[in-house]
Image (cartoon, rainbow, N blue to C red):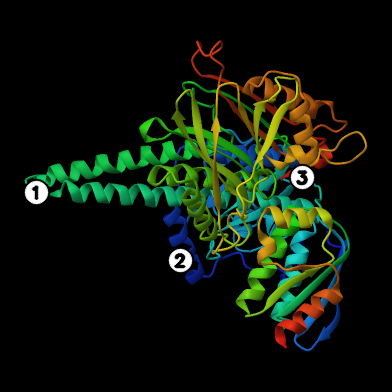
Amino acid sequence: MHQHVSATDEPDKRVVPLPAVEARRMDAVRRYDVLDTPPDGAFDRVATMAARLFDVPVATVTIVDADRIWFMAAHGLDGVAEIGRDPGLCASAVLRDDALVIPDTFADPVACANPLVTGPLGVRFYAAAPIIDAEGHRLGTVNILDTKPRSITLEDTQTLADLAAIVMDELELRLSALHAVRRERERRKAESRHAEVQHRRAEAERAAREQAERDKAAIAAFASTLQRTLLPPALPTVPGLELACHYHTASIYNVGGDFYDVFPLEGGRWALFLGDVCGKGAEAAAVTSLTRYTLRAAAQLNPDPVSVLSALNTALLFDVSAGSRYCTAVFGVLTPEGTGFALTLATGGHPPSYHLRPGEDGGSRVRADEVRPEGGMLIGALAEANFAATTVRLQPGEALLLYTDGLTEARTQDGAMIGDEGLGGFLAARPGPLTATALVQDVVALLDSLPEGARDDVALLALSVPTPQRAAAPGTVTATTHAAAAPAADTRQEL
Amino acid sequence: MTEDLHLAVEHTHGSLTVTTVTGEISFRTAPHLRARGLELIGQGHHQLVLDLSDVGFCDSAGLSALIGIWHAAQGAGGTLALAAVPDRLMRVLTLTGLHTVLPAYATVADALAAHQRDTA
């Protein structure tokens, strides 16, 4: 028998989809345009993650076509690209909204006749969660298979459903990319229409074919960029500035909800941001991609930090899963000014940054001033959110530290959080030089000295303006990344 | 699952409903808080006060749930207020500017008094 994980579900007697439902489902599959695309790192990663999480030899991500089941990604199933829609396993799983769990295929009246069960693979255990789009169409399934019977918990089933949701998020991002690319192509085409009137019909057709190839390449490039940006990027070299960063994730898969970036703007200016998506693991990482793209795109249109955060607020509110995705962030624009920089920094609900300057008496203590624009609200929660900016001047020998709350919420020996006061005190008392590299090293050493280290995601971004003695070198960048070796028991929670 | 978080409708004062939240609001239990809050609003409890005096812990996941409930209350033309907010959550509310839309009172009595003032 199928093990039913939803109390409201009727026993599934359907082995053939309803024609009208199936027609609408196939429209949705075509809309996402993924069938027979080349293997892709993002989906391979989901299949590999599923196999590792559930300790099964085979895990797959499939899209169900009209007459076949196509493998978008497969772990442990070399050389199989598609199978028929024989009832019992994937073909049945895609007919229902909840997960399908078959503890023992031999005991299941439908699955026992499926070729995957009777064939050389000899599948004895099968579980799958459907990949469901925003309109409720089931495009395919995320599947785990084993050659011996077993059972899984309700929480495991939820994890499987979460993996299916991650696949759906990725498909949605791709679809938006596809639309954006098409709009841009259409705009360019319109501009050059006058010049193209003379083209003969055959040439136009050839151009269209090439166009389609280029679209495909652009989309593939976009998808690979998405995958890469689940991790923070390498920082650029900024003339006259020393940059250092640190990234620690609580997830063993090295994806998290913290993010940062530094990138050039027109006119010799630079933009930087750092923030924290509410939530953890892969789900938060998907929102992180959206956030990073929006911040970069908005900054190119109008780099005013308050406008950029307002644009992100709007983007998160209008996202498909609006109402459940928030982040806090600081966004700044660096303008070279004399021997230093002017930094205009806006905040949206993010903890204060620290501006570090040598003590006035020349002693060992430094001045650690909070940079806290008044009134910046959480981003993505309210349509009417306000953001605020302030400008600080970074002179030679001065530094600025941006961080996420994984730092201030890390716990010391006595169990108390470091807190804003603790961090401010630490920064004022540390004896090291006021350089970005030393600053990040010292804060990482502080975290490493704690009994539990950093339990949550932590991102650090420091900038400093070298003193004239050190300024002979061009801009420098240092980066450290820590992926936590989280205990196995925590794995599921992090996803 | 949800056994470590519980919501109980304590009493109603005219249009106002006071609901006691007991337990820890975490990454795991926050979806339950959100679902129960939306259910109460769906049942017509549009003016909600959540009494958090028996909440031991609430992190940013709890914040998400509260925002979700606030949106639902707004959509129904109602309000959401908090009473006896734990320190850590209060700091987060202030940092994120949400205290300007999610009024937080020291006690349920204060929340009721404020409501009576507003509706007087």
Chain letter of disc 1 in the image: A
Kindly state the secondary structure of the residue where label 3 is placed.
Answer: helix
Q: Residues within 10 Å of mark 3 (few under 14, many from 20)?
A: some
The answer to whether marks 2 and 3 mark residues whose Cβ atoms lie closer than 8 Å is: no
Going by the numbered disc 3, the residue's amino acid type is Arg
Q: Report the residue at 79% width, 40% height from top.
A: A421
Q: Secondary structure at mark 1?
A: loop
| Label 1 vs label 2, nearer the camera | 1
Residue A409 seen in the figure = no
Quarter of the rendering containing residue A208: top left
Sequence-first disc among 2 and 3 = 2
- Residue A224 rendering spot, x and y as whole percentages: 48, 36
- Residue nearest the viewer, comparing B68 with A305: A305
Q: In front here: A114 or A187?
A: A187
Does label 3 or label 1 sit earlier along the sequence? 1
Q: Which residue is mark 2?
A: A23
Q: Nearer the viewer, residue B106 or A238?
A: B106
The amino acid marked with disc number 2 is Ala
What chain letter is assigned to the residue under label 2?
A: A
The mark total stands at 3
> Label 1 amino acid?
Val
Q: State the residue at coordinates (51%, 12%).
A: A473
Q: Position of residue A14 (x, y in %)?
A: 62, 68
Residue A27: % across, % down: 43, 61
Q: Is residue A129 visible?
A: yes
Nearer the viewer's eye, disc 2 or disc 3?
3
Task: Calculate the distance from the C-alpha at mark 3 to the C-alpha at mark 1.
Answer: 59 Å
Instruction: Measuring from the top left, give residue A293's x and y in whole percent.
Output: 48, 44
Which label is found at residue A492? 3
Residue at label 1? A197
The residue at the point 66 percent across, 67 percent down is B101
